[in-house]
Amino acid sequence: MSHRKRNDAAAGRGHSFGGSWTNAKLELIAKYLRSYTTVLKDKPSKQNPFKKGYIDAFAGTGYRDARQVDSDEKSSQVLLLPDLAAQEPQEFLDGSARLALKTEPRFDSYVFIERSAARTAQLEALKSEFPDLASRIEVQQGDANAEIQKLCTKNWSSHRAVLFLDPYGMQVEWKTIVAVAGTKAIDLWLLFPLGIGVNRLLTRSGDIPDSWRRRLDLLLGTDRWYEEFYRVEREPTLFGEADHVVKATTETIGQYFNQRLDSIFAGVADRPKVLRNSANCPLYLLCFAVGNPNGAPIALRIANHLLMEAERQWARVRE
């Protein structure tokens, strides 16, 4: 097959997004899913085993086409993430949905949520690619927040799940995260929009438009973030002292969000992974939170190990 035809075939199934940081994210998630299904394999809950589920709330096409994203105005407007327009090697790789379907031992159910009708149809095609799992796959077209909140209202007493929230930007709302924590049954991997989202909306002066404030309120679940992200210092000037606004660093922003997670979940990984682009700029924070108190110790042990391993690998790459 010619190079052009390969690209055309990829374009029919994949969607362009990410680079080396995406590889790190997906490798880590794949390792956790294998550990998760192994630990819960035939694990009893009273008389019956837990039913294990995988939920992907921004499932895309099931594939990831990491070809370079054009840095033109149109791409930036569509993604709202100019950092993702950096040139990366051309690859055609498994997305999180396909990685989950390949995980051994198998999950008992798979729920893929996607807003786009076209990508929803492509996710449906996974049933043909994985015919032995077709009856376990449920594809839902709709808003991720609404669909997840609906799922969380079900009876989770004999179910456990891993939820992967991998938004393009700031679509996830705090009330959705609260609903997930309330099940006490779901382990959450979440890509928090650290540098490409929150930090971009925090102006240096501290004067933030109302629409941006509302977006941050929805994401963080409070309007008290302003007190955490800005402080006023007095500095000497030629004419005496003057107040100077100091904006939080990305590290402070990440710590604040992780503390927010820790306030509602049974446990969180205390050192989430910062995902950076090829210019070493922070884009996302890959956070982990565990829902069930009984399962928290082992889940956190696995997640923390994988996060530390990923950090060591990233450090070697940067050397």
Image: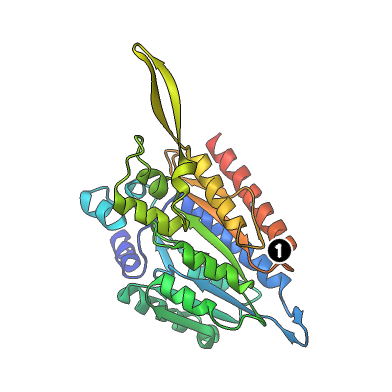
Identify the image quadrant of the C terminus.
top right
Q: Position of residue 290 (x, y in %)?
A: 64, 63
| Among the 4 quarters of the image, the one containing residue 235 | top left
| Residue toward you, 311 or 10 | 311
| Residue toward you, 95 or 251 | 251
| Residue toward you, 283 or 208 | 208
Q: Position of residue 197 (x, y in %)?
A: 39, 50
| Residue shown at 52% from the left, 41% from the top | 252
Q: Is residue 69 visible?
A: no
| Among the 4 quarters of the image, the one containing residue 140 | bottom left
Q: Position of residue 287 (x, y in %)?
A: 56, 55
Give the structural element (helix, strand or loop) at label 1: helix
| Residue shown at 74% from the left, 68% from the top | 294
195 sits to left or right of 2: right
Which residue sits furthest left? 73
261 sits to left or right of 6: right
| Among the 4 quarters of the image, the one containing residue 13 | bottom left
| Residue shown at 37% from the left, 66% from the top | 14
Q: Is residue 228 visible?
A: yes
Residue 211, relative to residue 161: is it above or below?
above
Which residue sits furthest top? 238
Q: Position of residue 102 (x, y in %)?
A: 56, 72
Residue at the disc numbered 1: 296
Residue 133, relative to residue 29: is it above or below?
below
Colour logic: rainbow
Q: How many marks?
A: 1
| Residue toward you, 282 or 270 | 270
The amino acid pointed to by label 1 is: Ala
